[in-house]
Image: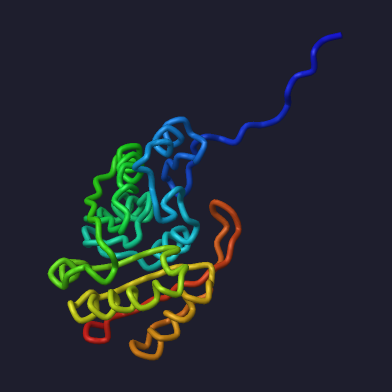
Amino acid sequence: MAASKNTTKKKPQTQTVRGLTIYGPRHPTIRKMMEKTEGPEIHGDKVWYSSYFIMDYLDNKPPAKGSRVMEIGCGWGLLGIYCALNYNAKVTGVDADKHVFPFLQLHAEKNKAKIKTKASRYEDLKPKILAKQDLIVGGDICFWDELVDPLHTLIKNALDAGVPRIIIADPGRPPFLKLARKCRKLYKATIKEVSITQPKKNDGNLLIIHNPEIN
């Protein structure tokens, strides 16, 4: 009797979403990088889904070509890479964990994008660098209560420095909603419910802040 074939399908090791090539967590290159002792420390071990909410939103309300974009809590940097490729943006990826940057640069090279990086906590970003930005974005970055105050400090400092627009996305965790309500009260921010179908159907929230001194 002939041996039965194993029909179990293996998950693809890379996927293409919105024109971006993304390494899966089981890709040999990713697994090898993860095994190193200097691997990511603050949940920087994959692409977090809320980045796609912002990509979808920017498709309809894009930044001007050549804008300076800062992705905070960038992790693997796919949102910043998307902005670089689609809007010719000059992107800086910021993360408190410098060990995510090799994964960011791996994806940047794969997608033929150039991204600058900076290791910093939210509240430590100086007005001088914030003042250079046209747009600040971040997905899945307010998942602990202790992140609310540092993120609010960043938002306040960014608005004071003249940043025109800030967009933060999240599935709707309580810390994010706390931050969002605070920003709505203080800066007349918009909290927008969103739904997308790529790479799969999912719902979430956007916090959209326009600088009242500019818009």
Quarter holding the C terminus is bottom left
Q: Residue furthest top?
A: 1
Query: Of residues 57 and 76, which is closer to you in this image?
Result: 76
Query: Of residues 54 and 179, which is closer to you in this image?
Result: 179
Q: Quadrant of residue 107?
A: top left
Q: Is residue 156 above or below residue 115?
A: below
Quarter holding the N terminus is top right
Q: Position of residue 3 (x, y in %)?
A: 80, 13
The residue depicted at 47 percent of the width and 55 percent of the height is 48
Q: Residue furthest bottom?
A: 185
The residue depicted at 24 percent of the width and 52 percent of the height is 117
Q: Position of residue 147 (x, y in %)?
A: 39, 72
Q: Is residue 104 left or right of residue 119?
A: right
* Colouring mode (rainbow / by chain / secondary structure / one colour): rainbow
**Number of marks drawn:** 0
Q: Position of residue 191 (x, y in %)?
A: 46, 79
Q: Residue furthest right?
A: 1
The residue depicted at 25 percent of the width and 49 percent of the height is 115
Q: Is residue 130 above or below residue 42?
A: below
Q: Quadrant of residue 190?
A: bottom left
Q: Residue furthest front?
A: 37
Q: Is residue 210 above or below residue 123?
A: below
Q: Is residue 9 left or right of residue 187?
A: right
Query: Of residues 112 and 48, which is closer to you in this image?
Result: 48
Q: Is residue 194 left or right of residue 95?
A: right
Q: Is residue 94 above or below residue 135?
A: above
Q: Position of residue 138 (x, y in %)?
A: 37, 64
The residue depicted at 21 percent of the width and 67 percent of the height is 133
